[in-house]
Image: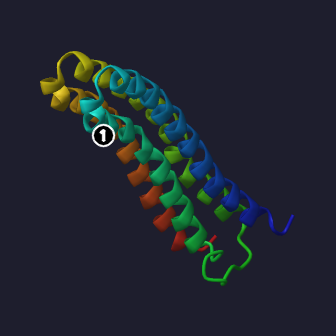
Amino acid sequence: MENMGMVLALAGAALASILAGIGSAVGVGKAGQAAAGVVTEDPSKFSKVLIMQLLPGTQGIYGLLIAFITLSQIGILGGSAEALSLAKGFLYFAACMPIAIVGLLSAISQGKAAVAGIMMIAKKPDQMSKGMIFAAMVETYAILALLVSILAIFGIAGLNI
């Protein structure tokens, strides 16, 4: 029971990385399937559809970043880990949840928007920028969740609980 704070903080870091990573894998996978179909018909569109396929991958990076920041703040990275109170453990866990949940859902949604953009490129390659904008709009919410997680994690460090 004395290590539950640390366990909760580690669980939050793990979920941030795992859930956002799953979302990115699903989103990039869906876009990759669509991109492969387009490239089969017209190999010259490879670079355009590759860019669209990569867009949903950023949420996984954001989740990994939050995991690293959390692990650093609680002392796991650097070897200075000390016991965390249960309250602080819950706070770190909660701070990781915005990017974990929003990362999961936004990456999947962004993958769907990227598929639509890839289909747009298949028919009208000159409209690629419009397809990118549609997919990038979903990214906004992942960035907002990333910022909330970062601000919360750094805010916890100064608390004496």
Q: Which residue is drawn at 56% across and 52% down?
A: 96
Q: Can residue 137 be seen in this view?
A: no
- The residue positioned 35% from the left and 25% from the top of the image is 113
The answer to which of 149 and 137 lies nearer the viewer is: 137
Left or right side of 1 for 113: left
Give how far across and how far down residue 107 sits, in percent: 45, 35
* x and y percentages locating residue 64 in the rendered image: 52, 57
Bin the neighbour count of mark 1 within 10 Å (Cα to Cα): few under 14, some 14-19, many 20 and up: some
Q: What residue type is labelled 1?
A: Ile
Residue 14 on image: x %, y %: 65, 54
- The quarter of the picture where the N terminus appears is bottom right
Of 161 and 11, which appears nearest the observer? Answer: 11
At numbered mark 1, what does the secondary structure look like: helix, strand or loop? Answer: helix
- In the depicted view, which residue is nearer to us: 63 or 41? 41
Judged from this view, the residue extending furthest toward the right is 1
Identify which residue is drawn at 69% across, 55% down.
Answer: 11
**Depth check, front residue: 150 or 89:** 150
The residue carrying mark 1 is 51
Q: Is residue 52 visible?
A: yes
